[in-house]
Image (tube, rainbow, N blue to C red):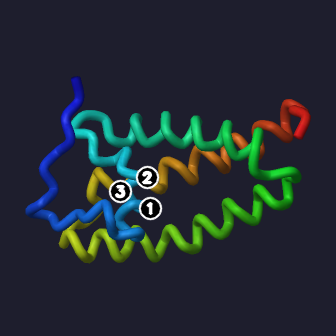
Amino acid sequence: MYEFKCFIQKKIQISNPWHLLATGLGSGLYSRMPGTIGSIVAILIWHELILFVFQSRSSLLVFILLTILVGIDACDKTARDTQSLDPGFIVLDEFIGMWITFFFFQQIIGMRF
């Protein structure tokens, strides 16, 4: 069973919206394979986004671009708060990378949207 790492010394506060976003809704706090866990959560969120939230590709693209812009700030603030350089628990980049890939992959294979 996976355990959460103790990030108290690094000042991670999951109640802080910047930390929550940067850690991929907490998925980056797993002690083993935080990036892989973050990618799995990103896939699940993508599935929900295209099924229930976004009705067009353009609105989904705007969402991805906004996530990139907000994510840069969230990841920067979280890294500064934890005094870490490229911390493994910041997995928002995995989320965005998966979403960009899926966005263009759907277009290539002609998935209905």
> Residue at (59%, 43%) from the top-left corner?
45
Q: Are dots 2 and 1 in contact, CB under 8 Å?
A: yes
Query: Which of disc 2 and disc 3 is earlier in sequence?
Result: 2
Classify mark 3: helix, strand or loop: loop
Return the mark for residue 21.
1
> Residue 90 at x, y = what percent?
35, 56
Amino acid type, mark 3:
Ile
Q: Kindly state the secondary structure of the residue where label 1 is placed.
A: helix
Above or below, comparing residue 7 to residue 10 in the picture: above
Residue 100 image position (x, y, % from top left): 67, 50
Mark 3 packing: few (<14 Cα in 10 Å), some, or many (20+)?
A: many
According to the image, label 2 marks what residue? 24
- Outermost residue, top direction? 1
Q: Amino acid at mark 2?
A: Gly
Question: In x, y percent, where is residue 109?
Answer: 85, 30
Residue kind at label 1, given as amino acid type? Leu
Residue tagged 3: 90
Judge from the rendering whether residue 19 lies leftward or rightward of residue 71; answer left or right. left
> Is 60 on the left or on the right of 85, as rendered?
right
User: In the image shown, does 87 or 50 lie closer to the viewer?
Assistant: 50
Quadrant of the image containing the C terminus: top right
What is the distance, in whole Å, between disc 2 and disc 1 at their CAs?
Answer: 5 Å
Q: Is residue 41 above or below residue 23?
A: above
Total marks placed = 3
Instruction: Count neighbours of disc 2 (C-alpha within 10 A) and say few if under 14, some if 14 to 19, many if 20 or more.
Output: many
- Disc on the earlier residue, 3 or 1: 1
- Relative to 26, residue 72 above or below: below
